[in-house]
């Protein structure tokens, strides 16, 4: 497994769609929980002192929460920053993997994939780098085969420089070979000469 060698990440908000969805979901849960406790506190104050109106119960509840409300407001940005950093640890690797895959498809991948030490899914780098190495090797072999295919006609023409003359000689020899193989020995021009002379003498007599 490749060791993470990337520098510390300074940009935490890197995947707007994923990280924003997580932050919004957590914010909705937090506001819902805050509203639940606020309503519960107001109802409790109103039930303890039913003679007081709803507005008085609300003021009384605010006085009770005034002690812990500043600390709660200070914890909200700290929790948001920590949550954003945590989401970056799984959104960042996927973003980097997507970018490296696009470079590999375009033929511009010049280095293996590495994640940072605190990232999730570091084991993805070994699988991706193995696939990347095999794909680059296949591409290299295809290029070599393409070069051999382009050089093949030139080599054939180099080896057959005398092919036109040789083709003419073979063309002349073919009818001779065909005549010698088709005609019987008795019907060759040499063997037919005595037969023609005997026929002429018999016609004269």
Image: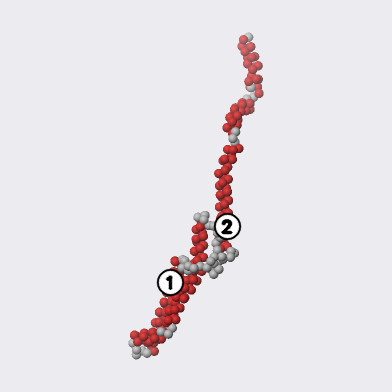
Mark 2 and mark 1 lie on one chain; the one further toward the N terminus is 1
Q: Closer to the camera, 101 or 197?
A: 101
- In the rendered image, which quarter is residue 30 located in? bottom left
For the residues bearing labels 2 and 1, Cβ distance under 8 angstroms: no
Mark 2 lies on residue: 133
Q: Residues within 10 Å of mark 1 (few under 14, many from 20)?
A: few
Question: Residue at 64% across / 24% down in the picture?
Answer: 184
Q: Is residue 129 above or below residue 180?
A: below
**Considering depth in this image, is 26 or 36 the residue closer to the camera?**
26
Q: Which residue is mark 1?
A: 24
Distance Cα–Cα, label 2 vs label 1: 40 Å
18 is higher (above) or lower (below) than 71: above
Viewer-closest of 128 and 190: 128
Q: Position of residue 58 (x, y in %)?
A: 36, 85
Say if residue 124 shows up in the picture: no
Q: Is residue 203 visible?
A: yes
Q: Quadrant of the C terminus?
A: top right
| Residue at the spot 36% in from the left edge and 85% down from the top edge | 59
- What residue lies at 62% left-to-right and 28% top-to-bottom? 177
Secondary structure at numbered mark 2: helix
Asked if 151 appears above or below 11 in the picture, the reply is: above
């Amino acid at each position: 497994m490749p060791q993470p060698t990337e520098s510390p990440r300074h940009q935490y908000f890197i995947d707007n769609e994923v990280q924003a969805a997580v932050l919004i979901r957590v914010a909705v849960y937090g506001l819902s929980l805050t509203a639940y406790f606020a309503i519960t506190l107001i109802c409790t104050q109103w039930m303890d002192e039913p003679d007081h109106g709803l507005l008085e119960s609300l003021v009384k509840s605010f006085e009770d929460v005034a002690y812990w409300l500043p600390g709660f407001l200070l914890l909200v940005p700290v929790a948001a920053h920590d949550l954003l950093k945590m989401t970056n640890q799984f959104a960042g690797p996927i973003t980097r993997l997507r970018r490296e895959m696009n470079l590999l498809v375009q033929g511009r991948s010049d280095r293996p994939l590495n994640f940072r030490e605190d990232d999730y899914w570091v084991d993805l780098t070994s699988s991706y780098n193995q696939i990347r190495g095999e794909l680059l090797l296949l591409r290299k072999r295809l290029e070599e085969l393409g070069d051999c295919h382009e050089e093949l006609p030139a080599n054939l023409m180099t080896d057959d420089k005398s092919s036109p003359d040789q083709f003419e000689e073979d063309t002349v020899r073919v009818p001779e070979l065909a005549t010698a193989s088709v005609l019987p020995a008795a019907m060759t021009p040499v063997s037919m000469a005595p037969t023609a002379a005997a026929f002429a003498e018999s016609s004269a007599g």
